[in-house]
């Protein structure tokens, strides 16, 4: 995989595994065998056999030794220790692993890669993730589930985890997971386990007060070896790294905790068991190659902010609530996204704005109210609010509990599905694909069909403004009254490229 430059460091995203056999076969042509191949090919086995035979022959020739079969000796097993003896061996790292281990998942994604010289091909990617909500919401790297390709289609995602880390004999549990959304620029993705919870979940710490030299623990799925634990220190902060889309960030955590391919997306914990980062890359240098002991992690404060801003119901779930809630506070400290301090003791999240005639207004909400519960989950800030909204997949009726004048009240908000709303107004669906906003499932009796718009035409402008997402189209349509006319511009595509520009007037 080609390294990409970033301030003297070059990142090697460890979410996509190398093909072990291919490397071992290359090693048969003169390179050293790699110990991470799933099993050695025949040439390696033959070489090992010849080497052993040579060693035995050399010993006989030069040492004058005769070999005879020695009686087998049974392996000695150390007597089992009593609980008090074992307890004395429990270190702070053991305590952290037992606490946070059940929140760590191993991820396996089945992909379909479109385009390229060989056309569409099936591919796979492995990595790690961490559960941050009892509904089974998982945070990981976007490149883990996309194979670091913008042309991939996610066919299936499987997760596995161990529910109890105090017993080494507990087997891994496997579940399927759904992709709720991902941000390739920030290399972050949000998934949900498709099984009923509750699941153990990690507490978010803060990366604002990290100390150089403090102990950190990484848990993940390196090279497919599930549930592997490594530890080290915070080596540096504010390291630079280019994202998969080329955007450069300068806030990454550098650690010497050993990371390998498959650790991507996995958690980095402090000694208190608080999540402080998401492991993203292994540093490298163009001159010296891959670095040893230089892992890079996305700081948890950026993760928390992204979950509170980018991963909102409007952009992520295509649901319009007709309200805005306050932003996340800047205060440091551990944050529980499931609201363990919720209920009557939770301050919730304040409603800053309620739009006229929107779903929130119809549900009786007003600016100044504080939402303390979404569905069956307490909320403590905007990130917790967004994640709790994400657990209500497939429904637009959202039960809410809020405070007004110190009194708890309950209501049900009927969110508007913006895709359904757009179809009702335009007579077609809109799908973001390959950089265009394409019309699909055009109703021959609908508004856009009446002016000659067909399947896979690309919408460029609506009402004199450029639009690039279904959210922008929805906002623009809300300003146009039923029966009014509006101008639109489309591009007709051929082989995925525009070849004709069309303009027209649409009556809604």
Image: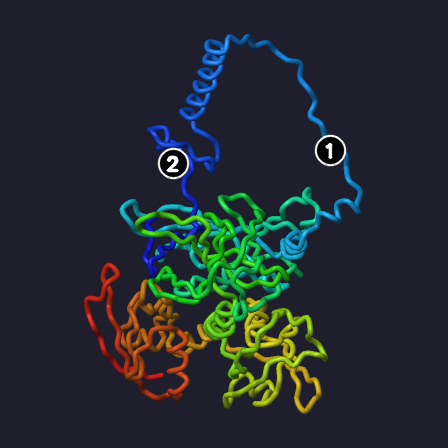
Cα–Cα gap, marks 1 and 2:
39 Å
- Residue at the image point whose x is 57% and y is 47% from the top: 228
Q: In this image, 130 relative to 424: left or right?
A: right
Q: Secondary structure at mark 1?
A: loop
Count of labels shown? 2
Instruction: Examine the rendered structure and indicate whether residue 365 appears above or below residue 342.
Output: below
Q: Report if residue 64 is visible in the image.
A: yes
Give the residue number, with chain letter if any, for mark 1: 78
Q: Position of residue 77 (x, y in %)?
A: 72, 30
Q: In this image, 489 relative to 329: left or right?
A: left
Q: Secondary structure at mark 2?
A: helix
Q: Report if residue 191 is visible in the image.
A: no
- Residue at the image point whose x is 52% and y is 66% from the top: 300
Give the residue number, with chain letter if any, for mark 2: 23
Q: Position of residue 28 (x, y in %)?
A: 36, 28
The image quarter containing residue 272 is bottom right
Callout 1–callout 2 Cβ contact below 8 Å: no
**Residue extending furthest front?**
63
């Amino acid at each position: 995989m080609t390294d990409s430059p970033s301030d003297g460091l070059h990142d090697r995203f460890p979410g996509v595994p190398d093909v072990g056999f291919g490397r071992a076969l290359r090693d048969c042509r003169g390179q050293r065998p790699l110990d991470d191949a799933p099993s050695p090919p025949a040439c390696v086995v033959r070489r090992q056999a010849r080497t052993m035979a040579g060693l035995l022959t050399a010993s006989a020739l030069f040492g004058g030794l005769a070999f005879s079969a020695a009686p087998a000796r049974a392996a000695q097993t150390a007597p089992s220790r009593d609980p008090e003896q074992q307890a004395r061996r429990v270190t702070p790292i053991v305590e952290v692993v037992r606490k946070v281990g059940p929140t760590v998942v191993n991820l396996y994604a089945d992909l379909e890669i479109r385009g390229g010289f060989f056309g569409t091909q099936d591919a796979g990617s492995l990595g790690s993730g961490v559960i941050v909500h009892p509904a089974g919401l998982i945070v990981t790297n976007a490149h883990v589930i996309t194979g670091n390709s913008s042309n991939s289609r996610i066919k299936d995602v499987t997760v596995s985890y161990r529910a109890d880390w105090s017993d080494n004999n507990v087997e891994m549990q496997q579940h399927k997971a759904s992709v709720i959304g991902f941000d390739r620029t920030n290399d972050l993705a949000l998934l949900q386990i498709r099984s009923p919870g509750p699941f153990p979940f990690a507490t978010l710490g803060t990366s604002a007060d990290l100390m150089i030299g403090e102990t950190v623990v990484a848990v993940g799925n390196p090279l497919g070896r599930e549930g592997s634990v490594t530890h080290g220190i915070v080596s540096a902060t504010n390291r630079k790294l280019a994202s998969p889309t080329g955007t450069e960030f300068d806030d990454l955590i550098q650690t010497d905790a050993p990371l390998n391919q498959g650790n991507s997306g996995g958690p980095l914990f402090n000694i208190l068991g608080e999540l402080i980062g998401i492991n993203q890359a292994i540093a490298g240098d163009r001159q010296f190659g891959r670095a040893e002991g230089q892992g890079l992690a996305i700081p948890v404060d950026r993760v928390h902010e992204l979950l509170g801003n980018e991963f909102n119901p409007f952009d992520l779930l295509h649901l319009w609530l007709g309200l805005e809630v306050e932003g996340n506070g800047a205060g440091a400290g551990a944050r529980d996204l499931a609201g363990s301090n919720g209920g009557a003791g939770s301050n919730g999240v304040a409603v800053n704005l309620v739009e006229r005639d929107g779903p929130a207004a119809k549900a009786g909400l007003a600016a100044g109210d504080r939402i303390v519960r979404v569905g069956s989950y307490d909320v403590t800030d905007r990130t917790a609010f967004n994640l709790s909204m994400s657990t209500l997949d497939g429904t637009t009726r959202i039960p809410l509990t809020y405070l007004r004048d110190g009194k708890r009240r309950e209501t049900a908000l009927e969110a508007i599905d913006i895709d359904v709303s757009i179809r009702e107004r335009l007579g077609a669906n809109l799908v973001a694909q390959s950089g265009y906003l394409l019309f699909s499932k055009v109703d021959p009796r609908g508004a856009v069909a009446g002016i000659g718009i067909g399947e896979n035409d690309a919408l460029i402008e609506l009402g004199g403004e450029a639009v690039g997402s279904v959210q922008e189209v929805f906002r623009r349509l809300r300003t146009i009254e039923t029966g009014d006319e509006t101008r639109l511009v489309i591009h007709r595509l051929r082989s995925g490229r525009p070849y004709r520009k069309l303009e027209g007037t649409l009556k809604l």
